[in-house]
Image (cartoon, rainbow, N blue to C red):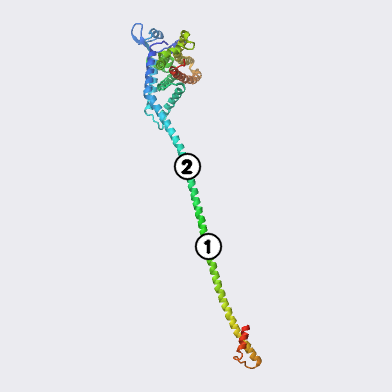
Amino acid sequence: MAGDTLTSSEYIKHHLTNLTYGQHSDGSWGLAHTAEEAKEMGFWAFHVDTLAFSILLGALFLIIFAKAAKYATSGVPGGLQNFVEWVIEFIDDNVKSSFTGKNNFIGSLGLTVFVWILLMNTMDLVPVDFLPELAKLLGVNNLKVVPTTDPNATMGMALSVFGLTLFYSFKIKKPGGFFAELAFHPFPKYLFPVNLLLEGVSLIAKPISLGLRLFGNMYAGEMIFILIALLPWYIQWSLSLPWAIFHILIVVLQAFIFMVLTIVYMDMAYTVDEH
Amino acid sequence: MNINATLLGQAIAFALFVIFCQKYIWPPIIGALRERQKNIADGLAAATRAEGDLELAQKNATAKIKEAKNQASELLAQANKRAGGIVDEAKDQANEERARILASAQAGIEQEINRAREELRTSVARLAVEGASIILKKEVDEKAHAEILDDLAGQL
């Protein structure tokens, strides 16, 4: 439902602009009013909407699960505990099948990654105009509802995972072993600069592909919802309904892929190569 | 779509969430899961054991029943034997009794016969004497002919 005063491209642009808080060019701090203004704010600016929604959803996840954990019993479980146990067992199975090391921290990591991303992705199923229009009534001009369509959110998680893999690589293999893995593989030792280049690229590619895969999928999905929303209101449903149903698959699949890859990368950090 | 400090904010939030999860969510629930798993495994093991016990008890019971049956049939056989003995004894006694009664009856009959014969003998002798006296029209001296009469009676 494009507003009368907006052209299609303005409408799309509006929907793809985050609510940004940062330093204006004149030196004062505040919310950016246009995409250009947000761009000028540089690195030290925050996407308030991304942070707010992601933290709210993360808190929702933690509150529900913590409630189940508080009353967890090994006897007959209630409905909530049943559900939470089902999720946790699912994560635990994945960890067991992919992670060969011994670290009970991986389960929590996988659980947080999966449920948090799932919740953030699910925000995509809220009609695209619903929350932004509501925000407009409250005087907020830009609102991007789905945190995972913001590369900052996905890369923030991907880089965190990357940091963890580096940490465990150093811890398990010791710096020497980690260097050896990067330098003496796949070619013989005397070609170590080539090895280092190849392995370095593949090392850097992991977090980038991890973050951008999720971002790209959710961004594209959101974009299609926005394009559908440009159609006349009486035919929107015929496209948005099938796309939403299909998108349910993507929402879960992307959360699952991110979780599995996180576990696999952690496993790689733990596995000592035979070189 | 600018990369900015939101990245850091997300990373911090992520770290906090994971830590919270590791501290308050994962351990109790996975603990409850493991404990329930153990309980179920124990329960299944107990059920298997109970099944074995039941089988054993059934075997025992069957053996006991068999033993009792054997005893009962033994008792029955003994009782039958005893009853047969009693009946045989009674039969023997009855036979003896019969023989005794028979013997005494025969003795009585013999006595009766002898008496009747004696009576008959005397009456025949008298009849013969009377007949002869009638024929001879004279009184036969019984005393004189006692020898003849006795002889006659002895021939009868």
User: How crowded is the residue under tag 1: few (<14 C-alpha within 10 Å), some, or many (20+)?
Assistant: few
Residue A64 seen in render: no
User: Callout 1: residue from which chain?
Assistant: B
Q: CA distance from mark 2 to mark 1?
A: 46 Å
Nearest the viewer among A29 and A249 is A249
Residue B19 seen in render: yes
Residue drawn where x is 52% and y is 61% of the image: B85
Q: Amino acid at mark 2?
A: Leu
Q: Amino acid at mark 1?
A: Val
Nearest the viewer among A7 and B102 is B102
User: Callout 2: residue from which chain?
Assistant: B
Callout 1 secondary element: helix
**Along the polypeptide, which appears first: circle 2 or circle 1?**
2
Q: Say which mark, if any, is on residue A189.
A: none
Q: Which residue is mark 2?
A: B56
Q: Position of residue B87 (x, y in %)?
A: 53, 62
Residue drawn where x is 47% and y is 8% of the image: A190
Answer with the quarter of the image where residue A59 lies.
top left
Q: Position of residue A60 (x, y in %)?
A: 39, 22
Q: Which residue is mark 1?
A: B87
Nearest the viewer among A191 and B50 is A191
